[in-house]
Image (tube, grey):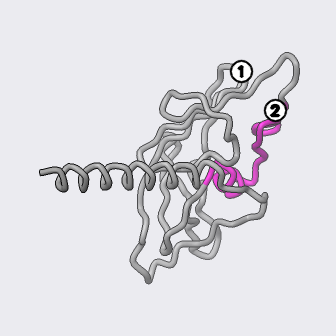
Amino acid sequence: MNSKWMFLVIVFFVAVAGFLYFTNTFAKASYNGFYTVSCIDSGKKPVRDYSLMINISIMGKDQQIPKDFGHKENNCLNEIYVDNSTGVVNVKTNEFKSFTLGNFFNVWNKGFNKDEVLGNKVSKEKSLEVYVNGIKVNTYENTPLFPDSRIEIVYK
């Protein structure tokens, strides 16, 4: 009986260590500002295919994500895209890749970091906050895009 409990304790600690490593790796993902989002290869089966919500509020006014976001010329559908202007963002990739809010804003060709969002600068009077599933984070452009998450960007 003792060996069974010992085995369960070891499995538990390995699972917790794996979870902490996984979440810590994504939380510290670097963002170098380069355009890193490719077109989806429609001839290959997607490895990752999920959606999440991104809401952006500037001075109390919701900002619309363009309904053609991620849809480029020459039949290029970016790995991060939307199908309409509801705030639902789709991620589909042919490789195991992880994306961040920095990647999202690169597709949009808009600035975003701890000091600005969509051209609105942080100052003594103006602040910028990012929430993931209702929890305030300070990862800004390094905030990971996870399946079924809800990201809120608030400039006030």
In depth, the one of 146 and 73 nearer the eye is: 146
Q: Are marks 1 and 2 in contact (CB under 8 Å)?
A: yes
Q: Residue furthest left?
A: 1
Instruction: Single out the residue that lies furthest toward the right.
Output: 124
Which part of the image, by quadrant, shows the C terminus? top right
Q: Please, what is the three-letter code of the amino acid marked with disc 1?
A: Met
User: What residue do we see at 57% from left, 49% from top?
Assistant: 24
Residue at image location 49% in from the left, 58% down from the top: 91
**What residue is disc 1 on?**
59
- Disc on res. 18: none
* Image-quadrant location for residue 122: top right
Query: Dot 1: what SS?
Result: loop
* Place of residue 144 in the rendered image (x, y in percent of width and height, measured from the top left): 57, 49
**Residue drawn at point x = 49 percent, y = 40 percent:** 86
Determine whether 26 is above or below 131 in the image: below
- Residue assigned mark 2: 120
Magenta residue span? 100-121
Position in image of residue 126 (x %, y %): 81, 21
Considering only vertical position in the picture, is 27 above or below 33? above
